[in-house]
Amino acid sequence: MSNSKPLDAWGRIELRPGDITEFDGDAIVNAANSSLLGGGGVDGAIHRAAGPELLAECRTLGGCPTGQAKITRGYRLRAKFVIHTVGPVYGGGRHGEPELLRSCYECSLRLAVENGVKSIAFPAISCGVYGYPMEEAARIALGTTAEFLTRHGEIERVVFYLFGEQAMSVYSEALSELGGMPGQRA
Ligand code: ADP
C-alpha cells in the first residue's frame, strides 16, 4: 500500500456507550493486569463473558509487561480475539505513564493488523482502578489511534466503549478538541 497520502482516520473512529463484551466485531481489547490472570472491572467482565477457556489460554502466556499487549481467542464472546494490554498505574504522570498508555494503544493496534483484525473495540484503559485522569487518557487514546489509522488502512473501524455518561462526554469533548467528528451513538 502506498503511504504517500494519509488515510482518513476520524471517520473510522466511533464512541459508543455500554459494555464492551457485547461488541460484535473482530477483536476487543482488555485492560488487563500484568499477570493476565484476571481481575475486576472490564477484565472481570471479559473473562465472565468469554468463559473459563480464556483464563486457561491466558495462563500459557507468562504475563505481559506494562505498555505491551498479547492476543488470545475470544471463546464465548462474539469477538474472535481478545487483545490483552496492561495500562500504567497512574502515579502523577511523571513516571512515563503517557508513553506507556500510548504504547498500549499502539501495540494493540499493531497486533490487530498482524492478525487480520478489521474492527476492534477499546475500553478506557487505565481509567478505572489504575486511576488515570480520563480527560488526559482520552486524548492519548484518540490521538494515538487516529495517528495509527492514518498509516494503516487495514483497520476499518475502531469503537471506544464508554462505561457511563461521564466517560461518554469526556471522550466526545476530547474527540472534537482533536478535530474528529462529534461522538456517534450506535
Ligand atoms: P484499569 O485497571 O486499566 O484502570 P478498569 O477495568 O478498572 O481498568 O477500568 C477501565 C475502564 O473500563 C473504566 O473506565 C471502567 O469504567 C470501564 N469498564 C468497566 N467495565 C466495563 C465494560 N464491561 N465495558 C466497557 N468498559 C468497562
Image (spheres, rainbow, N blue to C red):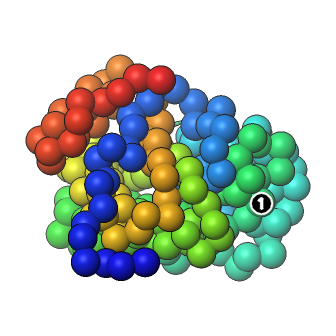
Residue sitting at x 31%, y 54% = 9
Does residue 73 show up? yes
Which element type, helix, strand or loop, lies under badge 1? strand
Task: Examine the image and state in which quarter residue 153 appears.
Answer: bottom left
**Residue 48's x, y, as percent?**
76, 39
User: Looking at the image, which is closer to me, 8 or 39?
Assistant: 8
Q: Estimate how packed mark 1 is, as few (under 14), some (14 to 19) or many (20 or more) residues with alpha carbons within 10 Å.
A: some
Q: In this view, does 6 lie to the left or right of 155?
A: left
Residue sitting at x 50%, y 64% = 154
User: Looking at the image, which is closer to me, 152 or 23?
Assistant: 152
Q: Is residue 156 left or right of residue 42?
A: left
Position of residue 181 relative to residue 8, above or below, is above
Q: Looking at the rendering, in which quadrant would you find the N terminus?
A: bottom left
Q: Please tell me how many numbered marks the rendered image carries.
A: 1
Position of residue 3 relative to residue 90, above or below, is below
**Residue 140's x, y, as percent?**
26, 56
Residue sitting at x 23%, y 35% = 181
Task: Examine the image and state in which quarter residue 182 appears.
Answer: top left
**Residue 99's x, y, as percent?**
28, 72
Disc 1 beta carbon < 8 A from ligand 1? Answer: no
Q: In this view, does 146 lie to the left or right of 22?
A: left
Position of residue 175 relative to residue 113, above or below, is above
What residue sits right under mark 1 in the picture?
Answer: 73
| Residue kind at label 1, given as amino acid type | Arg
**Residue 106's x, y, as percent?**
40, 69
User: Looking at the image, which is closer to me, 176 or 45?
Assistant: 176
Does residue 66 show up? no
Residue sitting at x 21%, y 42% = 180
